Every structure is written in structure tokens, then in C-alpha cells.
Amino acid sequence: MTKIKLCGLSRLCDIETANELLPEYIGFVFAPKSRRFLLPEQAAKLKKQLHPSIHAVGVFVNESPETIADLLQRQIIHAAQLHGDEDENYIRHLRTLTAQPVIKAFRIETKNDAIAAEQSAADYILLDSGNGGTGNTFDWKLLSGLKRPYFLAGGLSPDNISLALNTLRPYAVDVSSGIETDGKKDMVKMRTFVRAVRKHFSDTL
């Protein structure tokens, strides 16, 4: 079954809804330019309320590896998701500081973008339409022939998740703006999205 990541959680009510739904992953955004930005202290408070079965992922844009490793070592997050210009040397350096999983995000605009993503040294790759949280999809046909497991992101919502799962077989789906109303997480949309993913697999058994 495809795993679920609910990204950009920033309030206690978001965490409470996640605890009800039990996705495999949630995301805390540490990129200052994002409207979903959290300070480490805020994320730590939310993490204490998170169900222990849910993995917290930190989302970063060109952050110092030492800062990321510190958050991992303090167990505020379980994995790091890189959404900036981090290259292979950056990933290798981060790996010397922590053994926790690294997810590298790639913007997919051409077939060559998908091929480059597949060759990444990161533990996981995330395929997106932009810099994250844009609410736009990309041409999923560009992923044909992709053999490496991946997180699918970019414009996913309760309205198109069934189509995505009928078209592709991602390791995980990552949603943020698609479960928001007026820039805040919407509990109804969160529930609808998660139930749609699980219904897809129960219907195909």
C-alpha cells in the first residue's frame, strides 16, 4: 500500500487530526520563506504530541547540514527532506553527521529530470512540480519507466488522488496545499484524502 505524508502541519489541531488518521509521515517545514514555517521550538512542542507510530519529516531549503543533524539528533524529526539546491556532495556530508533518512526533492519538468532524480544518493526521492507547496501537478507520464521508489508530490488533493494512484505506483504520496482551506490545514480535507488513499487499496485487493 502506498504510504501517506501530510506535510506542512503547524498547529496542535493538525497534529490531533494526524493522530486520528495515522499517516506514515507528517512534515514540519523549516524553510523561513514558507507560510508553513516553524521554529525548532514550535516543532518540538508539536512533536511531543505526535503519535509515536508517525514519522516526522523536516523540510529544509539550503539549510546547513549541521542544523539539520542537530534536529535529527534531538529527535524533533526522524528524516530530512531537502527542497533546495543541495547536491550530491551536500548529501554525502549530511550522511557523515547523521544516519537518519534523507529525502531529496526534485522538480520534474522533463524526462531527464526524472532520470536525474533516480540517480540521487539520497535514501528517498520526492518528485514535485515546483519548490514545494505550489498546489500544481506535473506531467505524470514523465515518470514512465521509473524503477526507483519515490514520494509523489505536487498538486495532490482529495479530488485527484484516486487518479494518481490509478496512473502511478508511488512509494508514498505527499500532500500539503491540497488539504488546506485559506492557507490552513482543513481537517475534513485531511480525512478525505487519507480515506481516499486507503479506499483505493481496499477496493483493489
Image (cartoon, rainbow, N blue to C red):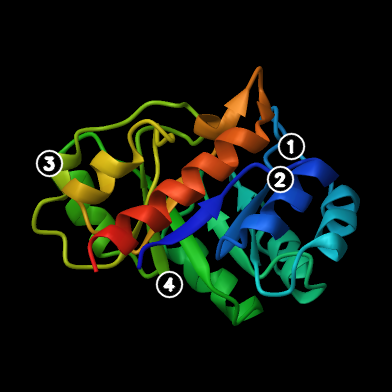
Name the kind of residue labelled 3 in the image: Lys
Image coordinates for residue 130, horizontal then vertical, percent: 40, 32
- Name the secondary structure under disc 3: helix
- Bin the neighbour count of mark 3 within 10 Å (Cα to Cα): few under 14, some 14-19, many 20 and up: few
- Name the secondary structure under disc 2: loop
Disc with the residue nearer the chain's start (3 vs 2): 2
Q: In the image shown, does 169 or 36 lie closer to the viewer? A: 169
Mark 4 = which residue?
Answer: 123
Can you tell which of label 3 and label 2 is closer to the viewer? 3
Tag 3 and tag 2, C-beta contact below 8 Å: no
Disc with the residue nearer the chain's start (1 vs 4): 1
15 sits to left or right of 92: right
Identify the residue shown where x is 66% and y is 70%: 78
Name the kind of residue labelled 2 in the image: Phe
Disc with the residue nearer the chain's start (3 vs 1): 1
- Name the secondary structure under disc 1: loop
Residue 180 visible to the viewer? yes
Residue 170 visible to the viewer? no
* Mark 2 and mark 1: Cα distance apart in space: 5 Å
Mark 3 = which residue?
Answer: 141
Tag 2 and tag 1, C-beta contact below 8 Å: yes
Q: In this view, does 82 lie above or below 70?
A: above
Identify the residue shown where x is 75% and y is 67%: 51
- Bin the neighbour count of mark 1 within 10 Å (Cα to Cα): few under 14, some 14-19, many 20 and up: some
Disc with the residue nearer the chain's start (4 vs 3): 4
Image coordinates for residue 96, horizontal then vertical, percent: 59, 80
52 sits to left or right of 55: right
Which part of the image, by quadrant, shows the C terminus?
bottom left
Which part of the image, by quadrant, shows the N terminus?
bottom left
Q: Residue 30 carries which label?
A: 2
Mark 1 = which residue?
Answer: 37
* Mark 1 and mark 4: Cα distance apart in space: 24 Å
